[in-house]
Image (cartoon, helix red, strand yellow):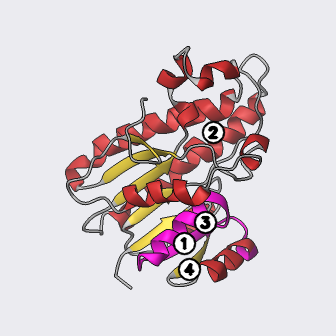
């Protein structure tokens, strides 16, 4: 085991669990962030190796503060926790659904990142990976030849929250570049998870998406920052 430490939010299932597993396989101590302690414990047992439980609700300031107080140094933060409340278009949207979505997908990422910044600043090579979505790309969504345009603006809360997350990624990367941080966003592609019914019915391997996140988490000092990348490492348009 090496001496690097990582935290993955929402890591008791789906892509996050695979990210935690792959980082642990690299010899890192990996904190498995989970709102539910029992689900988190089960994930830690399944991952094994250097996996450790960290009870963490990214929408709860007290939970975030308690979690951040547990770590003196952190090398890698993967903001993976995310939700999709509904698939409504903007004209049909429920404001509460928008608020709930942004609380996790945007405000939660900002709150967790800022809470763990002191620990990350003690790392010689701090890395932050924000798990976004290709559906948050305005370029792809506006392209009449791209599949996203045929969705007719559905999933407005989720997709716009990922657009906002991409912007937050860029601005965070710019603010922390002089300190040696590498901050990037990942478009994992459609994966078999419980995000929504379409994802649940897909045959996309979440471990494949996780490998893209791990690649960004383990970037060398010459690696990029402030980028948005597809799971296979190719740049994605904003």
At a point 27% along the width and 47% down the height, the residue shown is: 224
Tell me the distance, in whole angstroms, between the alpha carbons under discs 3 and 4. 12 Å
Indicate whether 88 appears above or below 118: above
Q: Secondary structure at mark 4?
A: strand
- Residue 49 screen position, x and y as percent: 52, 84
Whichever of callouts 2 and 4 sits on the residue coming sooner in the sequence is 4
- Can residue 91 be seen in the rendering of this structure? yes
Q: Would you name the residue on which mark 3 appears?
A: 17
Q: Secondary structure at mark 3?
A: helix
- Picture disc at residue 52: 4
Whichever of callouts 4 and 1 sits on the residue coming sooner in the sequence is 1
Q: Secondary structure at mark 1?
A: helix
Q: Residues within 10 Å of mark 3 (few under 14, many from 20)?
A: many
At a point 55% along the width and 40% down the height, the residue shown is: 133
Whichever of callouts 3 and 4 sits on the residue coming sooner in the sequence is 3
At a point 46% along the width and 71% down the height, the residue shown is: 23
Q: Residues within 10 Å of mark 2 (few under 14, many from 20)?
A: many
């Amino acid at each position: 085991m090496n001496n690097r430490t990582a935290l993955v939010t929402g890591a008791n299932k789906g892509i996050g669990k695979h990210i935690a597993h792959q980082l642990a396989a690299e010899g890192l101590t990996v904190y498995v962030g989970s709102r539910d302690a029992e689900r988190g414990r089960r994930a830690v047992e399944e991952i094994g190796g250097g996996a450790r439980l960290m009870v963490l609700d990214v929408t709860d300031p007290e939970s975030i503060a308690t979690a951040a107080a547990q770590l003196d140094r952190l090398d890698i933060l993967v903001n993976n926790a995310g939700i999709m409340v509904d698939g409504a278009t903007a004209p049909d949207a429920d404001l509460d659904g928008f608020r709930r979505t942004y609380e996790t997908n945007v405000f939660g990422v900002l709150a967790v990142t800022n809470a763990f910044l002191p620990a990350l600043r003690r790392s010689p090579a701090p890395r932050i990976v924000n798990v976004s979505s290709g559906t948050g790309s305005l370029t792809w969504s506006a392209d009449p030849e791209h599949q996203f345009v045929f969705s007719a603006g559905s999933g407005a809360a989720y997709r716009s929250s990922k657009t906002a997350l991409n912007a937050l990624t860029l601005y965070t990367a710019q603010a922390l570049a002089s300190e040696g941080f590498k901050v990037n966003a990942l478009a994992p592609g459609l994966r078999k998870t419980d995000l929504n019914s379409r994802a649940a019915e897909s045959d996309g391997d979440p471990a494949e998406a996780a490998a893209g996140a791990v690649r960004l988490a383990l970037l060398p000092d010459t690696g990029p920052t402030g980028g948005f990348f597809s799971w296979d490492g190719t740049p994605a348009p904003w």
